Image: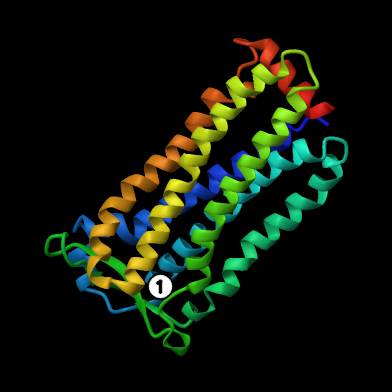
Amino acid sequence: MNGTKQVFKAFFMMATANFLFSFFDNLTFRIPSTGILTSWCASIEPNVYLAWIYIFQLFSAYWSLLFALLFSIVRVIIYAQPLSNEKIFKWLFPVYTIFSILFPAFTVFFLYTAKGYCRQWKWPYSFGAVFISYTDTIGDIRNDFIYFTLSMFIPIMIVVLNITLIFLGNQWAKKIKNGSNIFKAENVKTLYYTTIAMILPFAAHGTMAICGWLFPSVSGFVVVLRSPITELGEFAVPLIYTLTTPMFKWKKNNSVASAFITIQKI
């Protein structure tokens, strides 16, 4: 099977999840921190609408993690199961997508009774900088420990999967003429760069979550650093992938694209 379609599908799902995360994360933290909403926030009572902005920020954070993992899994499956990956993808995509959408709905259950409000940032933000926070949760739970764990575990899994992909790709490359050089020159470079870009946002967001839990006084400083790092990583992944992946180079280097497809059809 030509796995290019499945790789692009996983890539598109990951990019969409990253966009949603960036959108809701900016609504929750970055836009209010500019001070443009401070007077409006001061005029309203805590309400469920603000709480749901925070909830969707958490939903999209989970989606960004899980679909980045799916992207890595799909690429490994293509090389690990070249003859049966079509059957695997027929159930993997719908099952994984449903799980990824529903899983956060269970993990953030404690927020369904919450009310959102605008909370003042501390140093290094100036007076008037706020962010959306919440109160009145179920059982007075304040932290999502499942997300803490996943934000550390999934980046490690992405690194492991990409190392596995390099190994499998080199094995297949040896089976075609000049395949080893093609894989090393194109695919390994893509894997190195995309791996770094993919794990940067998760590492930054996980650090903020842990610091907010263990060291609340420095959480504002972490957000100042986290926001540009997150956006840089999420912008860099599609850019690096499209510039370095052979399937986007049909006209420039048809031999590389052909060899890439040949590997997936073996």
- Nearer to me, 42 or 187: 187
Q: What residue is drawn where x is 59% and y is 10%? A: 252
Q: What residue is drawn where x is 83% and y is 27%? A: 265
Question: At which x and y percent is residue 53?
Answer: 42, 65
User: In which quadrant will I find the C terminus?
Assistant: top right
User: In which quadrant will I find the N terminus?
Assistant: top right
Secondary structure under the numbered disc 1 in the rendered image? helix
- Total residue callouts: 1
Which color scheme is applied? rainbow
Where, by quadrant of the figure, is residue 161 drawn? Answer: top right
Q: What residue is drawn where x is 55% and y is 59%? A: 153
Q: What residue is drawn where x is 33% and y is 67%? A: 211
Left or right relative to 114: residue 121:
left
Left or right relative to 259: residue 188:
left
- As drawn, the residue found furthest toward the bottom would be 139
Question: At which x and y percent is residue 131?
Answer: 28, 65
Examine the rendered structure and indicate whether residue 186 appears above or below residue 91: above
Examine the rendered structure and indicate whether residue 173 appears above or below residue 17: above
Question: At which x and y percent is residue 85?
Answer: 82, 41
Examine the rendered structure and indicate whether residue 71 appears above or below residue 97: above
Question: At which x and y percent is residue 205?
Answer: 40, 57
Examine the rendered structure and indicate whether residue 173 appears above or below residue 46: above
Label 1 packing within 10 angstroms: few (<14), some (14-19), many (20+): many
The residue labelled by disc 1 is 51
Left or right relative to 261: residue 115:
left
Name the kind of residue labelled 1 in the image: Ala
